[in-house]
Image (cartoon, rainbow, N blue to C red):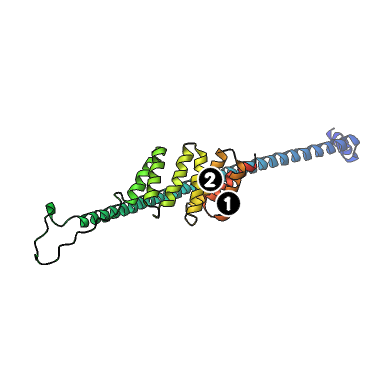
Amino acid sequence: MFRPAIAFATAILLSGSPALAGDKTHQQMMAEIRMLQEQQQQLAQMVGGLAETLKIVTTRMDDQTNASRKAFADQKLLVDGIAEGVRILREKADDTNVRLSSMSQELESQRQIISALPTSAGGIPPTGDPGGPPPSTPQQPGAPNVAPQKAYDAAFNDYTGGQYDLAIEGFNFYLKTFPKNDRADDAQLNIGNSYYALGNFRDAVTAFQRVISEYPQTDSVPAAYYKLGLSYEGLKQPDFARRAYEAVIKNHPNAMDAQLAKQRLDSLNRR
């Protein structure tokens, strides 16, 4: 009884009916779709993993970059600190040298005064050969009462303390008393600086021009040209200011004042 049914089913399977063939094709397509979906999921997982790895690498690179920047900043701070320390030490050394020079000059002045004093008290001539020539009276030296460095320091202290009128008087006294001293150019420059600080630009121009004309070989000339330009700007004379800036840039290109003059010149040209 079952054999005919089995045979019938077998015949149907072997007959290759269109309905059965369609089911197989559908099943095969569904299987391929599932495979593609699985592959897509695997690719998505791989992309996600790569993205996470890229994120980690990027984070590490950012951390390394930040660490490098911090290390560079720390090194720069260290170098700047060392440079500042060296600058302070140099200033202290210069100040010490100035003080030593001032003390030496004062000591020499005192020695000259002492050597000029009478050799005996009360003006009584010393005992000696009555038949011999009278003792010679030493000549009083014509040395100034104030040492050059002390006079300069007094005027400079007034200048740094904002007492510009007193500073001008002090520097003028210094130039009148010690016209050939090696700080004469600095004194003349600071006279101009004092006038400039007071807003007296016209007298400042005159003072800075004297630095350039009377002390042309000194290191005060670049600063005098630059300050001359600033003074002309204060007088609303930009053409003269440009000439002063161009002069320091041309004649003293390596000076710090030349760099400052270039900045001011660029500012004037942009107006």
- Regarding mark 2 in the picture, which secondary structure is present there? helix
**Is residue 135 depicted above or below 106 in this figure?**
below
Is 212 on the left or on the right of 87, as rendered? Answer: right
Is 127 on the left or on the right of 254, as rendered? Answer: left
Q: Which residue is mark 2?
A: 228
> Which quadrant would the N terminus be assigned to in this image?
top right
Q: Residue at x 66, y 43 (%)?
A: 46
**Is residue 94 depicted above or below 15 in this figure?**
below
Q: Residue at x 57, y 40 (%)?
A: 233
**Is residue 124 depicted above or below 4 in this figure?**
below
Q: Percent from the top left, x then y, of residue 67?
A: 51, 45
User: For this rendering, which residue is in front, 126 or 90?
Assistant: 126
Q: Is residue 209 visible?
A: yes
Q: Residue at x 81, y 39 (%)?
A: 28
Q: Which residue is mark 1?
A: 247
Classify residue 16 by image quadrant: top right
Identify residue type, mark 2: Leu
User: For this rendering, which residue is in front, 227 or 1?
Assistant: 227
> Which quadrant would the C terminus be assigned to in this image?
top right
Q: Is residue 49 visible?
A: no
Q: Percent from the top left, x then y, of residue 222?
A: 51, 51
Which of marks 2 and 1 precedes in the sequence? 2
